[in-house]
Image (cartoon, rainbow, N blue to C red):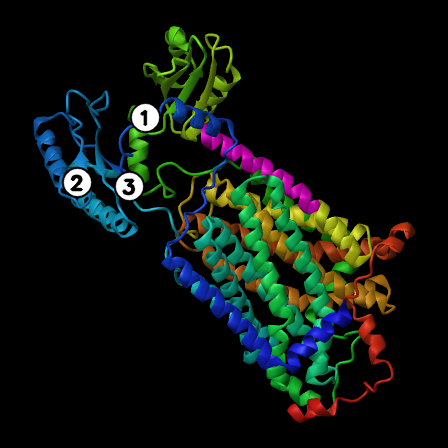
Amino acid sequence: MSTFLARVGRFSARHRLIVIGAWLLIFTCLVGTLVIGSQNGAADKASPSVPDSAASQALDRMNKEFPSTGSAPGATLQLVFQPTSGDVTAPGTITEIESQLDEAKSLPGVESVSNPFDPTSPYISKDKSIAVATITYGDLNEKQQVSDYAAALKLQSSAPNRLGVELGGNLVPLGAPAPGIGEGVGVAIALLVLILTFGSLVAAGVNLLVAVFGVGVTVVGVVTYGSLFPIGDNAIILASMLGLAVGIDYTLFILSRFRTELRSGKSVEDSVARATGTAGTAVVFAGLTVIVALVALLVANLSFITEMGFAAAAAVLVAVLLSLTLLPALLRTMGTRALSKKQRRQLLAGHLWVEGTAQKRGILRGWGSVVVKRPIIAMLAGVTVLVIVALPMLSMKTAFNIPGGSDPSSTERTAYNLIVDEFGGVQSPIIVLAEGSNVADKTAAIESELGEIDGVQQVLPAEISKSGTAARIIVFPEGGPIDQQTKDIVHDIRADATAISGVHVEATGEAAIGIDQDAALMSALIKYILVIVVISLLLLIVLFRSVLIPLIATLGYLLSVGASFGASTAVFQWGWLDPLIAAPQGDPMLSLLPLLLVGVLFGLAMDYQVFLVSRIKEMHDRGMDPQLAIREGFARSGPVLIAAATIMTVVFGGFATGTFAIGASIAFGLTIGVMADAFIVRLVLMPALLSILGEAAWWMPKWLDRIIPTIDTEGHALDAADEGQDTTAPDRRVLETV
């Protein structure tokens, strides 16, 4: 493979204008297709639902038995009044509230406003401390949703303070706000890290340029697909994050090897070919591992999860292709400007970098020596830190969505909680579907048994279908749909599905659907982790020709994922670091979060593992003893790994400072995961365990060694091709470009 990739790199370097033009043409075609597709109307966004769940099936059967009549109701908001003194029925208070209701009727888009004091349908709490009015809207487009909701918020904020008005509900679909200063600072620091790593602004710029261009191609491609077929926003989020992460890593790895080859005296074109043949092989293998793992999301058997996997896999594929084609073309254009001024002067003076010789100095070589000399202490310290950080994971709670909005301090959440506290779960009732030939005769008994379940506040009279074989019963729980007591009610109904009055009953509604969605995602997560473990073990065995190294790498990855889960739980569920994290805290974690973290962190962990150990293996294959190979491989690959991890940490950390709860929780989990995997698992645990194992680390059963293919990441085939060439002096073509 190394020979083939070297030819690809050399071809791209020689025909750089064609390669650059081809990628620009691809991007332009995607944009054109997107424009044409958008003119025909965008496809509906895919709904993240679990269609085969018990609650969804019950809802489908209920809709058939109780078809809706008339037009579908419009969106609604709730005006919640909680006077600071007295009760809502005081004459002066009623007058002020009705004045606010009159103003609400004049809001744009409003069709009707209910009166909580209407004797036929009062909406007043028992202690008369709260009154609720419902604002009903007609059909609204996206622009009207934003403007009409802003008008309603203005009404709420301008109301007299003594009325304590809160606005429940939201007309605007959930979406990420515009990027803030934190994201910009993160990208700026990433560029600074690249400049410090390379000592060259040109090299740093090319690294970011290729990665960002890859994200652009991927996002435009995914959005273009979404203009033709339904696709969810989460697929775009995962593809963007993973595409940026691996794009920076792959480009950084090949660019670093290109600089090394230049310093050894090879020509620019030969350096491009050599870097693409060696580092490119590792990139292809790392990318292939991640792509296979992402496609394996098919095991979840959930359409919105599958589309996330395929979109992210496309992002990784684009990053690999760009690093093997566009990057070599740009490297040929840069030439020796990829080196720092000092390195160019050394090259001009004939001071060459000789690959394979031991380095005498260097912070990373010193760190590697410390870990190698005290491997047991280093291993125990690293594992202890990761386990402690992961412990909060044991109390992690998840929810598919958070009722009342994602911000606990918003007026939307305050209104929702006030209604729950005073009226129970009227906003999210449990809908019970009873089915049987004689169901009409047993509705009274069913209602009585449902009312005896702990946590049930009220059971409305049953509605019988026209066929007479189904009854719909509305159950109001005491709490909201994600409260444990409400979940227990659903579980109790399902546990006695055939025992309640001798008919079959099933629960549906927001709480039941949320339970099924949460369970489906947790099952998908477990399956996915098992698949990832198997894939990483098999592919890393092929790459490193070792049984123990893949096992260590996979266990280390699981530790870093656990640390990510634990830290995210402590911060976003428990409320730690509240002064530092601007996003809302205190809610259960988003059900999709663990799946997203597992996917992105696996991609980064495989990058770091391949970058680090492939260099150690190269030194070992050159004849160095295990401990010296660890030190030298560590010293050569460590700067690249640290630079890549630092860039990801500051970029994700920038997003973690945002106010968007979902985006901040994902970014924070990735920040902790990257730090744990790169700086503890790869830079502490891996060299420590390799030192403890010694030669045993590279053990492979003879029967297995004979049947697995050889992946040449060290460039042995290229070495053979170079035999007989004079490599003791710098290539004249290099000196001419310095």
Q: Residue furthest right?
A: 702
User: Dot 1: within a 10 Å radius of its alpha carbon, few (fewer than 14), some, or many (20 or more) residues?
Assistant: some
The residue depicted at 35 percent of the width and 46 percent of the height is 173
Which quadrant would residue 90 be assigned to in this image? top left
Q: Is residue 525 magenta?
A: yes
Dot 3 falls on a residue whose secondary structure is: helix
**Where residue 411 is drawn, which disc sits there?**
3
Of badges 1 and 3, nearer the viewer stands 1
Query: The disc labelled 2 sits on which kind of residue?
Result: Asn
Q: Which residue is mark 2?
A: 161
Magenta span of residues: 512-533
Image location (x, y in percent) of residue 136: 22, 36
Residue 185 visible in this rendered orientation of the protein:
no
**Where residue 426 is drawn, which disc sits there?**
1
Q: For the residues labelled 2 and 1, say whether their Cβ atoms are less than 8 Å apart.
A: no
The residue depicted at 78 percent of the width and 64 percent of the height is 616
Dot 1 falls on a residue whose secondary structure is: loop
User: Dot 3: within a 10 Å radius of its alpha carbon, few (fewer than 14), some, or many (20 or more) residues?
Assistant: many
Query: Which residue is at the front of the view, 691 or 64?
Result: 64
Quick one: label 1 or label 3, which is nearer the N terminus?
3
Of badges 2 and 3, nearer the viewer stands 3
Image quarter (top left, top right, bottom left or bottom right) of the C terminus:
bottom right
Image location (x, y in percent) of residue 442: 40, 7
Image location (x, y in percent) of residue 289: 68, 55
Quick one: label 2 or label 3, which is nearer the N terminus?
2
